[in-house]
Image (spheres, grey):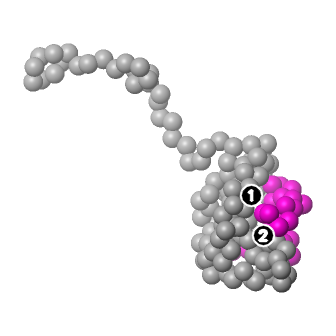
Amino acid sequence: MNERNNESPRKSYGRWAEDMGNMISAEPSGRYSHRPSDAVTFARIVQDGITGLELVGFIWFSDAEHAAGYFPADANIPISGNAGRVWSDELNKRCAKGRTPSEAFAALALFDLGNRIGRINVDSVQEASNIEGVRVIAKSAGIDDVA
């Protein structure tokens, strides 16, 4: 009953009538987490440019936290942004198939879209103490910073 006018409360209708319970999820299914708190492994994504290799972005992963993702290189924004969609989609496809982040990375290391999207420079694999370290490198790296 409503205290002010002695009416019974209104009934819910439509989609509000269903009790959906608590449906809180950290990440959508079929996607790796994008918020690791510990160390991550990362590598540069490069493409062939006019004067040699050019930096496109960074791919990173952590098996311990089931996390993986892509950061664009700020120095190469037109290509980096478009490449991010492709690399993120490819990671998500492998996650949906049940692959660990390192398995996805190994498969993508063979993936080469050349001048359109780039390829993983397997010689540039490194460890960072956390994801912020990779983000700082991505923001400060120059287009020629491929190693």
Q: Position of residue 13 (x, y in %)?
A: 37, 18
Question: To which residue does mark 1 refer?
Answer: 87
Q: Residue at x 56, y 48 (%)?
A: 26
Identify the image quadrant of the N terminus. top left
Q: Tell whether label 1 touches label 2 (CB within 8 Å).
A: yes
Q: Closest to the observer: 118 or 140?
A: 118
Report how far apart the C-alphas of labels 2 and 1 lie in the structure. 10 Å
- Residue 22 seen by the camera: yes
Q: Closest to the observer: 64 or 12?
A: 12
Q: Position of residue 28 (x, y in %)?
A: 61, 44
Task: Please determine whether, in this image, residue 4 is positioned above or below residue 24.
Answer: above
Q: Residue at x 59, y 59 (%)?
A: 35
Q: Residue at x 78, y 48 (%)?
A: 94
Q: Which span is picked out in magenta?
A: 103-128
Residue 61 figure quarter? bottom right
Look at the numbered disc 2 and give the secondary structure of its residue: strand
Q: Position of residue 132 (x, y in %)?
A: 59, 72
Question: To which residue does mark 2 refer?
Answer: 45
Residue 135 figure quarter? bottom right
Residue 47 figure quarter? bottom right
Q: Residue at x 65, y 71 (%)?
A: 77
Task: Please determine whether, in this image, residue 146 is positioned above or below residue 85.
Answer: below
Look at the numbered disc 1 and give the secondary structure of its residue: helix
Task: Please determine whether, in this image, residue 123 is positioned above or below residue 15.
Answer: below
Determine whether, in the image, residue 128 is placed left or right of residue 22.
right
Closer to the chain start, of discs 2 and 1, is: 2
| Amino acid beneath label 2 | Ile
